[in-house]
Amino acid sequence: MENQLTPEERQILLHLARQALEAGVRGQSSPLLDLVNMSSRLRQPGASFVTLTRRGELRGCVGALEAYQPLADDVREHAIAAALQDYRFPPVQPHELSEIQIEISCLTSPQDLEYAEPGDLPGALHPHIDGVTLFDGWRRATFLPQVWEKLPDPKAFLSHLCQKMGASPDLWFQRKLRVQTYQVEEFCE
């Protein structure tokens, strides 16, 4: 991935995410963000996902596929949303904060993936590199590249992604879907 964050920028984002997470869970406002004194990379529009784990188990994950606000703001917003708005989990409680680990994934711009036939799709993917978004009408679902660790087989990866979208697991094989791929720069506390 080009234009990677410096170690200092990564630490700033992790600090901002932690600050926002703790304030949000406690019902407080996040401190004002001083974008003027941040690096240009943190002020530029960026898309991120923030993943929360507790004792190694997923506790929340929320993000954006496309950049629409400064990266620093995006990370803060998604840290709070991962804790309080991931519909799969109850909101994070204050007593959990010391056990929550934060992982940030900064995304490249999504690219449409061209393939000829449904059966060609698994071979067009780059396991452990590509994040994948499937589209079917108004429905869509994405898996970050980190999901390849749990689902290394491209066919199983696609089937689980279809299920996440609320579709039949073999939808990707039944007909050609719109597919986008992206890569991430991932780092954690």
Image (tube, rainbow, N blue to C red):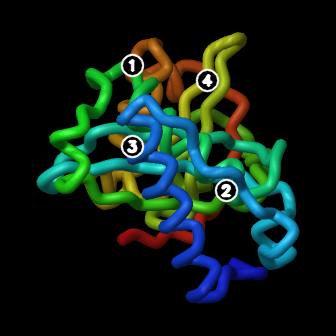
Mark 2 touches mark 1? (CB < 8 Å): no
> What amino acid is found at the position of numbered circle 2 in the picture?
Tyr
Number of callouts: 4
> What amino acid is found at the position of numbered circle 4 in the picture?
Arg
N-terminal of the two: label 1 or label 4? 1
Q: Mark 4: which secondary structure? A: strand
Give me the disc on residue 121. Answer: none
- The answer for how far apart the CA atoms under marks 2 and 1 are is 24 Å
Mark 4 touches mark 2? (CB < 8 Å): no
- The answer for how far apart the CA atoms under marks 1 and 4 are is 16 Å
61 to the left or right of 172? left
Rendered location of residue 172, percent (x, y): 53, 28
Give me the disc on residue 157. Answer: 3
Q: Dot 4: within a 10 Å radius of its alpha carbon, few (fewer than 14), some, or many (20 or more) residues?
A: some
- Residue depicted at x 65% and y 87%: 6
Q: Mark 3: which secondary structure? A: helix
Q: Is residue 111 above or below residue 189?
A: above
Quadrant (top left/top right/bottom left/bottom right) for the N terminus: bottom right
N-terminal of the two: label 4 or label 3? 4
Comparing marks 4 and 3, which lies closer to the viewer? 4
Q: Dot 3: within a 10 Å radius of its alpha carbon, few (fewer than 14), some, or many (20 or more) residues?
A: some
Which residue is disc 2 drawn over?
182
> What amino acid is found at the position of numbered circle 1 in the picture?
Tyr
Which residue is disc 1 drawn over?
87
Which residue is disc 4 drawn over?
140
